[in-house]
Image (tube, grey):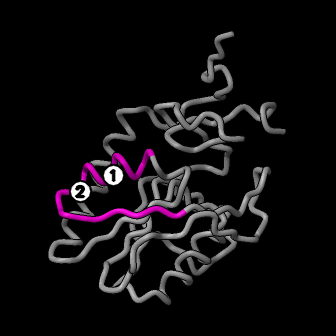
Amino acid sequence: MMVNLSNDVEKVLLSEDEISDIIKDLGKRITEDYKGKNLLLVSVLKGSIVFMADLMRSIDLQCRIDFMAVSSYGDGTKTSGRVKIIKDLDLDLAGYDLLIVEDILDSGVTLSYIKNMLKGRGPRSIKICTFLDKPERRIAKDIIADYIGTTVPDEFVIGYGLDYDEKYRNLPYLGVLKREIYA
């Protein structure tokens, strides 16, 4: 049985072309800001993997990458407030200029936890790059992204790596999930 994931999308927020333009702009800015630095991109799995892959190809500098997997959502659509490290970084952070790459900055709870934890590992600097910012949902007021692709409304967004129940990550655009799917 063939399933059309697009049938679950209420509306498209960003097309493939719009996403591409956002990534190119971020890549140019990061390239300029990190010249002469020891850039390490850290992808927060799983949601940021699509964004990270496109972003790193748009950065015209030598850089390394690493991955960590964390969870603060469990099975729901709202943060649980507890952050669990599922996969930690492989690299020693000493001497790196760290850029945490995230799919969406929502409550900020997860990023606040990650940033504070990684500070203690000796990187030269830590900054945050997020594809999407959802400021209305911010709980951790101390977290502000240094690079923001775009701001989105307080709706349940899917596609381009973002999921609901591990589905919809493969949509090539960013959409809003129909409420009846997750309510």
Residue ranking furthest to the top: 1
Q: Check residue 139 in the rendering and tell me which mark sits there, or answer none.
A: none
Q: Is residue 33 above or below residue 104?
A: below
* Residue lying at 63% horizontally and 69% vertically, measured from the top left: 85
Point 51% across, 60% down: residue: 44
Q: Looking at this view, is 114 or 17 the one in front?
A: 114
| Amino acid at circle 1 | Leu
> Disc 2 marks which residue?
59
In the rendered image, which quarter is residue 71 located in? bottom right
Left or right of 32 in this view: 165 = right
Q: Residues within 10 Å of mark 1 (few under 14, many from 20)?
A: many
Give whichever of 25, 61 is nearer the camera.
Answer: 61
- In reply to whether residue 63 is colored magenta, the answer given is yes
Please identify the quadrant where the C terminus is shown: top right
- The image shows residue 14, relative to residue 22, as above or below, that is above
Q: Amino acid at mark 2?
A: Ile
Q: Nearer the viewer, residue 46 or 101?
A: 46
Left or right: 8 with respect to 41?
Answer: right
Q: Which mark is residue 55?
A: 1
In the rendered structure, which segment of residues is drawn in magenta? 50-68
x, y (%) of residue 143?
55, 76
Question: Residue at horizontal 79%, vertical 64%?
Answer: 80
Question: What is the tally of numbered marks visible in this picture?
Answer: 2
